[in-house]
Structure formats: structure tokens, C-alpha cells
Amino acid sequence: MNILIGDDHSVVRRGLKAILGEAYPNADIEEAIDGSDLLKKAVSREWQIIISDITMPDLSGLEVVKKIKELRPRIPVLILSIHSAEHYATRVLKAGAAGYLTKESATEELVNAVKHIISGRKYITPEIAEMFVDQHMETSKTELHKALSDREFEVLKLIASGKTSSEIADMLVLSINTISTYRSRILEKMRMANNAELTKYAISKGLA
């Protein structure tokens, strides 16, 4: 069994590897330290499953999922995140991921999620399934952030958390000009004038 783990924190990688190593002692488990490294290793060989953090330098987990689905569509990807399911789960699954799991519940649920996915099923918790139903009933007028691209949504959340453009650029390994462009697109799509309005909206929707 071949498993690839992508996370920019070595402590997290070691923890996941320990959990999986106990459940699958004969598994070949490799690690990737960021999005680019993960994508490079993902297409280098066949994997039974790839486990990726959603927030990484260079390429985000969402971007990696989309690229893997283009290049190696048969390889399932499980996304891990510090964010609750309501923030990213539907985006992740629509991008082609086979499941979404919060890091908080990884200790108890990781092996179960992996078993589901390698058996050919998606790992969708009752909470996520209910979210799909609820979001199908929502309108774009009340959920303005649904019009944003995955990267724009990520930038929105960082703006709402109080990060400066310089800090966001460092976190995402992008130029400040690029972040400014994303901010302008976000303001235009959401019909808002400044960061204060974005932050107020994000807080009202539980995004910050």
C-alpha cells in the first residue's frame, strides 16, 4: 500500500504517519513538504491515497486536488484542514477530493476515512451531507462568497483574520501586487468597498 502525505508542518506529518503506520504496518508512506512537492510526488507514481493539508505554501490543497484530478484522476485525495467542514468541505469535494477531515478529528477518524476511500467510496460525514442540502437551498444573494474562486476565498479569510497584504503574500508565497489584485476582485465580486466590510461579512457568515 502506497500513501503520500502532504503538509508543511513536520510535526503533523509525523503524527499522521504514526497513525497510519500503526493501522497499515507494511505501507510505504512518503511525505511532501509543500504544494509543489506534493504535486511532483503525486504524479511520479501510483498511490492508493494522497492525504493533503488544505493550506500550504506555493500551492494550496485545493489547487493540488484539481491538478491531480487532471493528471492522475484515479488517485483519491483526502483533504485535512484546521478549518471546520462548513468553511471548505463543499469546495474540496466539488474540486474532486474523495473526502474532507478536520485535523481535530484526525486521531479518531483518519484510519476510518482512509478505509472508506481506498474501498472506492467517498468519506462524507453526516454533517457534510447536510451542508450540501442546505447550500443547495441557499441563494447567491445571501452567500456572496460563493462567487469567489478558491484562491480568492482563501485571501478573503486571511483578510478577515486581520492579516496585512504583506503577511498574506508571505503565507501564500505570492507577490504583494498579486494579493492586491485578488483583493480588488473580491471587493468587486462581493460589491463591497473595503476590508472592514469584508471582515464584517466574513464574521457574520462564520468565516473568520
Image: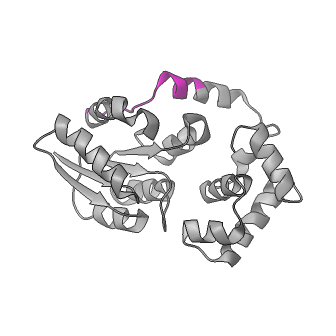
The image quarter containing residue 42 is: bottom left
In the image, taking residue 125 as reference, residue 150 lies left or right, namely: right
Name the residue at 69% across, 61% down: 163
Does residue 184 appear in the picture of this structure? yes
- Quarter of the view holding residue 10: bottom left
Residue 17 is situated, as x and y percent measured from the top left of the image, at 25, 47
Q: Residue furthest left?
A: 26
Residue at left offset 64%, top offset 55%: 149
Residue 29 rendering spot, x and y as whole percentages = 20, 51
User: In the depicted view, which residue is nearer to us: 123 or 155?
Assistant: 155
In the image, which residues are magenta? 119-130
Asked if residue 110 lies in the magenta stretch, the reply is no
The answer to whether 39 is drawn above or below residue 157 in the figure is below
Q: Is residue 125 magenta?
A: yes
Placement of the C terminus among the 4 image quadrants: top right
Vertical placement of residue 47 versus 135, above or below = below
